[in-house]
Image (cartoon, helix red, strand yellow):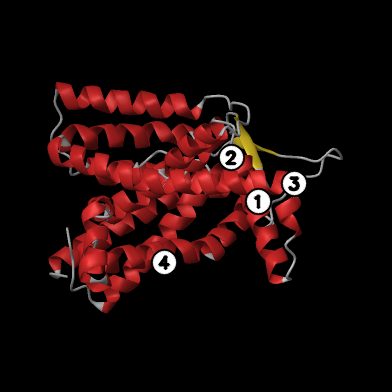
Amino acid sequence: MYHPTRNVSDKIFLFIKGLAMGAANKVPGVSGGVVAFVAGFYEEFIYSLQKVNAKAFKLLFNRGFSVFYRYINGKFLFLLMGGMIVSYFSVSKILDYFIEKKELYVWAAFFGMIIGSIYYIAKDYHHWNRRTLSFLLIGTLAGISISFLNPARENDNLIFVFFCGIISVSGMTLPGLSGSFILILVGNYVLLLVDSVNALYDTMAELLQGDTGFIHNKERLHTLRILAVFTLGSATGLVTLSHLLSYVLKHYKNITLATIIGFITGSLGVVWPWKKTIYRTAEDGSILRDSAGDPIILNYERFLPDPSAAETWIAVAFIGLGISLLLILEWYGNKKKRNGA
C-alpha cells in the first residue's frame, strides 16, 4: 500500500483526486469515499490513516518528523488532504454555484457517476455467494433507509456534538455515506457546518482587528466550544473509523466490499436528481446564507420527473454524461495498465 517513489504525474493526479474528494464531501448526499474507491486509492487511504496511531507519535518524539512522515505515508496524505483543502476554496465553490443555478443537471450528473461507480466497483468483484449477497442487500437497504429519513431537531449537547464529529467524517471513509447529509438527518448541519463556522470566522476577523470583545459574548463562546468539540470528534472519527475499516478490510474483505457496493447503490436515493432543495429562510422568505455566501440547506423534497418536460431529457443526458465519465476513467486506467504505468 505504501508508495514512496511516486513520479510527478502521479503526484499531480493524486492532488486532483483530493480536489474531487473534497468537492464530493462538501455536497450533502455525495460521498468523497466513492471518489477514493473508484479512483483506486481507497485502501491506501484507509491504511495510511490507520498509521496515525500511538506508535507514529512515539516515532515523532523519539526519532523526528522525517521518520514519522514516512511511517504514516505522509507524502500521500499531504497531497490528498492538500487537494481537499484547496477544493474547499475553489472547486467546491464552483460546484456550489452550479448547484444553485442548475441544480437538476448537477444532481443528474452525480446520479450518473454513482451508477457508473457501482458498475466500476462491481465488475471486478467475483465473490458472490449467499453470504456476500446478504450483505449486499443489507448495505442497499441501509442506504435507502438513510435516504428517506426525516431530519431530527437541532441538539447542542456536547456529547452529541462529539458523536456528530465522528459521523461527519464518514463520507471520507465509508463510500456511499455522506457525512454532511447525515448531519442534516440528525438536525445539526446548520449548527455545526454553518453557525459554528460563522462564529469562528467572525472571531478571527475581530482578532485581526484587535477586538477581543467576543470573550464577553456567552453565545459566541458556547458556539466556539461546540466547534472545538465537533473538531475533536471529527479527528477521533477519522482515526478510529480508519482502524476499524482497516481491520475489516483485512479480515472480512469480501463481505465488506459487498456491503459497500450495496450502500453505494442505496445512496442513489440521496442524489435522486428530481428534488426540491429546502433552504433555511428569513422571516421575509429570503434564503439565508453562511459566511462564505453559500445557501443553507435544511433538507430535500423528492418527486418523479415529468416525461413531457424538455429539462427531464436534458437531465437524462447528464446522467449519461456522468456514467460516461466513469467509463472513461475505466478506459484510462486499463490503458495505463497496458502501458505498464
In-image side of 124 versus 306 (left or right): left
Quadrant assignment, res 130: top left
Q: Residue at x 71, y 39 (%)?
A: 280
**Which residue is the site of mark 1?**
100
Mark 4: few/some/many CA within 10 Å (<14, 14-19, 20+): some
Measure the C-alpha gap from mark 2 to mark 1.
Answer: 18 Å
Residues at marks 3 and 4, CA–CA distance in whole angstroms: 30 Å
Asked if residue 170 is positioned above or below residue 44 in the image, the reply reads above
Numbered tag placed on residue 288 in the rendering: 3
Real-space Cα distance between discs 3 and 1?
13 Å
Does the image show residue 165? yes
Taking 170 as reference, is 98 above or below it?
below
User: Disc 2 marks which residue?
Assistant: 189
Residue 82, numbered label: 4
Task: Name the N-terminal-most of marks 2 and 1.
Answer: 1
Q: Earlier in the sequence, mark 3 or mark 1?
A: 1
Give SS at disc 4.
helix
* C-alpha gap between disc 4 and disc 1: 26 Å
Task: Check whether the beta carbons of the residues at disc 2 and disc 4 lie within 8 A of each other.
Answer: no
Q: Does residue 109 appear left or right of residue 55 in this picture? A: right
